[in-house]
Image (tube, rainbow, N blue to C red):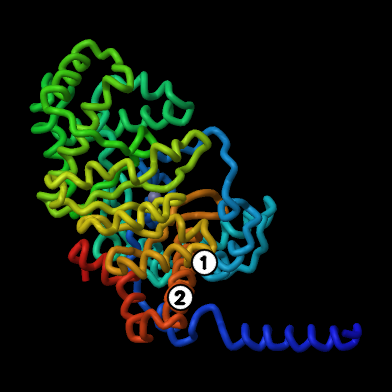
Amino acid sequence: MSLRALLLVLALVWTSISAYSQQQPPILPDLAREIDSIAAIDNHAHPMLSPPADATDREFDALPVDNMAPQTDPVALRPDWPPLHDAWQALFDIDLQPPLTPDTQKLLDAARARVKAREGEHYSAYVLDKSGIATMVANRVAMGIGVEPPRFRWVPYEDALLFPLNNASLAAETPDRAQFFALEDKLRARYLRDAGLTKLPPTLDEYIAQVVLPTLKRQHDKGAIAAKFELAYLRTLAVGNPSKAEAAAVYTNYIDTNTSPDPATYKPLQDYLFRAIALECGQLGMAVHLHSMAGAGSYFSITGGNPMNLEPLLNDPAMRHTNFVFLHGGWPFVHEVGAMLQKPNVYLDISQQALVIPAPTLATWLREWLELFPDKVLFGTDGYPYSPYLGWEESTWLAARNARRALGIALTGMERDGEITPARASQIAHMVLHNNAAALYSLK
Ligand SMILES: [Zn+2]
């Protein structure tokens, strides 16, 4: 073939490829419009309070650690991430390019302050409005101004209840855990005060009856719809099934002396308490939320956080009256966590993944989950105050946009391959963005 003929053939091939890709948008336009119009339930995020309480709000996380040992940040958490521009524009009506300089950061701060001043106590709900979110499940130590039902539903933290003894041996495991356990000790002291006690009771039975169960009851009475565990930051997710006698012995042996049990000795007590809390959550109608993704910080145990560690617990018939939700879709164990959805009381959400994993990649495993268990997958953002340029507002907005794109790509692929009809694609979009969570928590 002559060079001229070869070029002609290449030109024809290129024209047909580009024509094909123009005919094949990654998301079917009708489906994209429908997905954008659904007012979502965000299964997991950390909204901050509205003005004037926002200035001193530290209750958006039980472990709000600002000084963890350095990690390699994923691209989406870096200051030069291009999509930041769109979030600043949409939320604060300001046209800035990342990365910000000290001067443009000041412009962003001022734009944010203007919107806060304009919106006042409605500011937190304004962020939801801008992100297409009707209801945000707020994982916070406590609720407050602007972050209240019906737009926000509460999920408090329970890890502090699992570690009632001297935690020095656990705190010594990594520099990050040294900070975490100091914070958990503070939160447990608060739960103790709320229970009307000044010190821990002498026996495990009394600890459960006077501290653990009343704390859950109080949270439920205040509107909590689920109980959150950041357990994967603190130890392995492998929860055993120790006898009560074994757990009680650890409690009584160490509560008096205030010495710190070594991690292996301590674990049966934590496991027993986790089970007691999960059972009570089932009684109260609260779901159990578990952090399940490679977490923040360079010392996070990705192995210990593998959701498969929880399978023995989930296969215990006693646990079948409690619903468990794997937050952040178990990344990198996305196939494993997907298989866990076959257990009737197990769900997952795409929070955090929706922020850091670009839509085309997230869509690949989202599609796998939706092909198998479309009624068990929940939308979520994990909006969180990461930094001065990526606040809870920006992370919520960006994750919501990216999640909708990923959902659109996954459902478009299923429709084009003849797996589902357009009507079913629309139905699944409503399920993921709203109906599955509404059914799980009995919300509207
Ligand atoms: Zn979170």
Q: Depth check: give the residue in front, 196 or 429.
A: 429
Q: With respect to residue 439, does 356 lie above or below?
A: above
Please report the residue visible at 38 percent of the width from the left and 57 percent of the height from the top.
Answer: 50
Q: With respect to residue 10, does 175 lie above or below?
A: above
Q: Residues within 10 Å of mark 2 (few under 14, many from 20)?
A: many
Q: Depth check: give the residue in front, 134 or 271.
A: 271
Of the residues shown, which amino acid type is indicated by label 2? Gly
The kind of secondary structure element at disc 1 is helix
In the image, residue 144 lies at what x, y percent?
A: 30, 52
In the image, taking residue 71 as reference, residue 195 lies left or right, namely left
Q: Which residue is mark 2?
A: 408
Q: In the displayed orientation, state which residue is furthest to the top.
A: 257
Please report the residue visible at 72 percent of the width from the left and 87 percent of the height from the top.
Answer: 15
Contact, mark 1 vs mark 2 (Cβ under 8 Å): yes
Of the residues shown, which amino acid type is indicated by label 1? Ala
In the image, residue 271 lies at what x, y percent?
A: 23, 33
Quarter occupied by residue 301:
top left
Q: Which residue is mark 1?
A: 359
Quarter occupied by residue 40:
bottom left
- CA gap, disc 1 to disc 2? 9 Å
The kind of secondary structure element at disc 2 is helix
Q: Depth check: give the residue in front, 204 or 7.
A: 7
Quarter occupied by residue 382:
bottom left
